[in-house]
Amino acid sequence: MRFTLNGVATNVDAHPMSRLLDVVREECQLTGTKEGCGEGECGACTVLVDGDPVCSCLVPLAQVEGAEVVTIEGLGDDHPLQHAFMNEVGAQCGICTPGMIMAALSLEPDASIDDIKVALSGNLCRCTGYSAIYRAIMKARQP
Amino acid sequence: MRTAISGLDLRRATSVDDALRMLADEARTPIAGATDFYVALNFGTLAPRRFVDIWGIDDLRGIDVRHDVLVMGALTTYTDIIRSPLVAERLPMLIDAARQIGGPQIQNRGTIAGNVANGSPAADAVPVFAAADAVVVLRSIRQERRVPITQFYTAYRTSVMRADELIVAVEVPRVDGKQWFRKVGTRAAQAISKIVAAGVRGASPKFALGSVAPTVVRAYATERALASGTPIEQAALTLTREIAPIDDVRSTADYRGQVAQRLLRRFWSETN
Ligand SMILES: Cc1cc2nc3c(=O)[nH]c(=O)nc-3n(C[C@H](O)[C@H](O)[C@H](O)COP(=O)(O)OP(=O)(O)OC[C@H]3O[C@@H](n4cnc5c(N)ncnc54)[C@H](O)[C@@H]3O)c2cc1C
Ligand code: FES
Ligand code: FES
């Protein structure tokens, strides 16, 4: 099965019904993408498929053939959102953080706090109480 | 994941005909956005073994108006709906529903045909379709047929759709009157409805509810009462006779009955 992973042409030999989550973590050894619930509720497994955030625990590998998949590793180590989550303590245990950041990537530069809440409505965090996360995202968009 | 996938057989359809041939050849379960399906797979509660992936069939995408009918392809996602000027113009209550289905990740993958075919009494798009007199377009290798959504379900999670049929589209005629949608859940995003309602306030009012019976309910007697000028309190009593709510993990029958009446009153006052 061929697809592009973080800009790199990738070919994995796995069952077509494998969850994209497992392929990314196990076949491709990119463990930044997390499994929380395994049923679409928590967003910890969020990746981008052709630019759109999706829950990788609900995506069959077959459905990404030829697609562009971006995981948290695709951002490198120096993305403004990553710095802002660190500086604002938007991450505590960190399990939700990769998913939060991947979901936040789709926000327009002029997004309001309400837009941010909507964009992250599919992501759960049991540590921060969310306000530090919203603050981090607001800060990351100020140059 | 609790299902061993090694024993599962997936074929991928490249066109509608391709998919219909596979369905005619042997029993296969279609997979669209997989947002219901993979939850079951992860849970280990899935019985079927053979599947056909229809996600790649672009002919099943697209929103169009033909002969004054809004035609939405089976693979129309909630995100497609939210972004569609045609839906905004003709069926704004479907946009209200779509915005409250899951979060963005689910909206990007979940499809209207999946919502209809899955057959959950809590499916949020279904009461909208029922209140709008939508028609489900079913196709097999032999024929195409159109079934009004109000006649689509025969019992809890059971429908008239045959094993060799696919939903190819949902059609919605022009809706006359002010549209209204309300979902009552534990929170705005991600929550399964405790009860969900859609209404149209026109010359002949229309009102449909989810999660108050084994299938979606179109409240015809209540609608007739409203059309003939019956006071809303009395119409609300009629409504309680048209629904059959149950106790379950999300809510009780008594609560649902009361909320159904309250939703009807809200519908009536907010569309005045
Ligand atoms: C976290 C989460 C939150 C959710 N929140 C909501 C919510 O708020 N409201 C709500 O209503 N739903 C909700 N859902 C359920 C689900 O997202 C929707 O029902 C969605 O529309 C299903 O579409 P799908 O394409 O993903 O279906 P799939 O999972 O691909 O399929 C579902 C069923 O439909 C059948 N099917 C799919 N397409 C066709 C077709 N064209 N012809 C015939 N059969 C077909 C499949 O065989 C399967 O039985 C939620 C799900 C998750 C995981
Ligand atoms: S692990 Fe995918 S949404 Fe929770
Ligand atoms: S930081 Fe622990 S779940 Fe969000």
Image: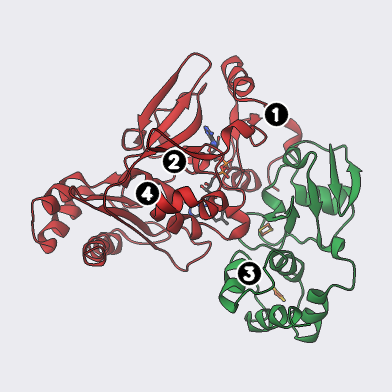
Q: In the orientation shown, which residue stands out farthest toward the front?
A: B67
Question: Which label was assigned to residue B128?
Answer: 4
For image coordinates 27% across by 62% down, the residue present is B263
- Height in image: B144 above or below B241? above
- Height in image: B95 above or below B72? below
- The residue that disc 3 covers is A124
Does the rendering let one see residue A15? Answer: yes
Residue neighbourhood size for the residue with mark 2, other residues' Cα within 10 Å, grouped as few (<14), some (14–19), many (≥20): many
Q: Are marks 4 and 2 on the same chain?
A: yes
State the image coordinates of residue B51 (x, y, percent, origin top left).
64, 30
- Height in image: B208 above or below B62? below
State the image coordinates of residue A131 (x, y, percent, origin top left).
63, 83
Q: Are marks 3 and 1 on the same chain?
A: no
For image coordinates 40% across by 32% down, the residue present is B159
- The residue that disc 1 covers is B12
Q: Earlier in the sequence, mark 1 or mark 4?
A: 1
Alpha-carbon span between mark 4 and mark 2: 14 Å
Check disc 4 and give the amino acid type. Val
The chain letter under disc 3 is: A
Closer mark to the observer between disc 4 and disc 2: 4
State the image coordinates of residue B163 (x, y, percent, origin top left).
50, 23
Closer mark to the observer between disc 1 and disc 2: 1
- The residue that disc 2 covers is B119
The picture's colour for chain B is red
Does the rendering let one see residue B94? Answer: no
For image coordinates 70% across by 31% down, the residue present is B8
Q: Earlier in the sequence, mark 1 or mark 2?
A: 1
Alpha-carbon span between mark 3 and mark 1: 33 Å
SS at mark 1 in the image: strand
The chain letter under disc 2 is: B
